[in-house]
Amino acid sequence: ADLLGIRLAELHAKHGIARLMSSNSTRAVETSELAMRHLPHLNGKRAEDPMLREIGCPCPPEPPMNNYRAEYRYHEGSALAEAAFRRHIHRSSRSDEAQIVANGAKLEVILPSRLLGFGLSCAAVGAASAALYTELSSLAPDNKPMSVADPSAPAVYLRPVTSDQLLNNLRCCDPVLPGTKWNNNWDNRHWRTTDSSTSNNNNIRSIILVRHGRFHHSDRLLDDLGRRQAEQLGNRLAQLHRRYGISRIISSSAPRAVQTAELAMRYLPNNLKRQECHLLTEVGWPCPPEPPGAHFVPEFYYHDRAARAEAAFRRHIHRADDDAGESTNELEVFVCHRNIIRYMVCRALQLPPEAWLRFSVDHCSITWLDLYPDGRVCLRCFGDSGHVPVSLLSKDNVR
């Protein structure tokens, strides 16, 4: 909580913090009050809302959890989660200052799931953690609902739940919330977890996706800020290596990704060698986003880029292969590009790939995917830039 306060003070210096709100649970109150010691401008004033308390499981997760929960257990929790969402997550015509909400972990998951327009059944997968810091001012002013992929498309993904659908399905003895069942064999490697002859099939594959540092479009190389970001990344990777181990580092062939990887590797053991994969190079827009982007992009633009993004996903994002040295339970680091990371996360979590533009990825931030042998996928963090000082944060390149 003390480190949180230091970070919030940095964010206040750059963006301003208008208020701090917590649930009335002891742990949330204590966390808030410890952090507020670093925010004297709030004068110790903290708002409190009991609806932000931990709610257990807000809805049946997909894939299901190991421990069975009776249907009635979701009856109140889902309504409380939706009530908290509608009270606190909305657009505002007031100042752009940040508002801090301290609540329970499950509620942190459910609120961004609703915000990004994903079906609530995906909450347990962890995709929602991507939006814990969200620029609400960027939502469409007409409140136009987000559409999803054509149901006739060959790939099936979780579908968003509209407000009306949600209102009609809030655990009033109705069927579970609509959503597509999780596909455990999404990488066509399911036989490896059931074949008794496989020597080692109990390993979790942990993948770290890193966006390169800031670069200048004129020479396509890192600028001074980008190099400093890469050094901060190196410090964080060194910490992760000491705790978990890093088995390999792969970068795209783009100079900015190569530079970022090599600068970061100065902080890692000399026996780690950088590998390179051209499929990880920036693809531009991997597929038409929904809602649409600010600039029109003709359909033919996606013809080869979508295939290249999918090829990169299928080559690198899959469960561990014993014969490929991917079953050590150490971290594998991929230094690549913003849109590739967005696309891969959507695909790994079986979310609509056209949702990729709803995620924001800072330079040299870390995205962590855990791929379990049974086919489950967990997003441990998305776009984590806590290792980069606020004064060095950036998300746009220099033109």
Image (cartoon, rainbow, N blue to C red):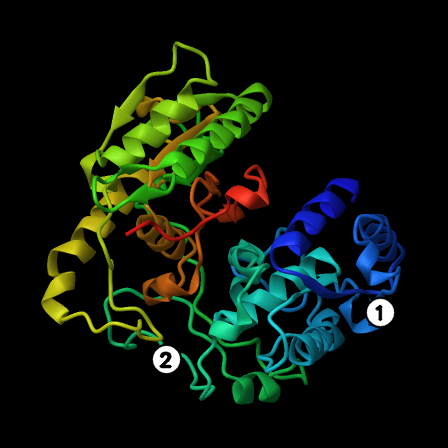
Q: Which residue is drawn at 66% across and 61% down?
A: 16
Name the element at disc 1: strand
Tag in front: 1 or 2 = 1
Rendered view: 250 above or below 388: above
Q: Position of residue 331 (x, y in %)?
A: 47, 28
What numbered label is drawn on residue 48? 1
Q: Where is residue 394 in the image (x, y as percent from the top left)?
A: 45, 49
Q: Earlier in the sequence, mark 1 or mark 2?
A: 1
Q: Residue at x 44, y 81 (%)?
A: 140
According to the picture, the residue beneath numbered tag 2 turns out to be 147
Q: Position of residue 311 (x, y in %)?
A: 21, 46
Mark count:
2
Labels 1 and 2 touching (C-beta < 8 A): no
Q: Residue at x 82, y 51 (%)?
A: 31
Name the element at disc 2: loop
Q: Residues within 10 Å of mark 1 (few under 14, many from 20)?
A: some
The Cα–Cα distance between marks 1 and 2, rounded to whole angstroms, is 35 Å
Q: What residue type is labelled 1?
A: Glu
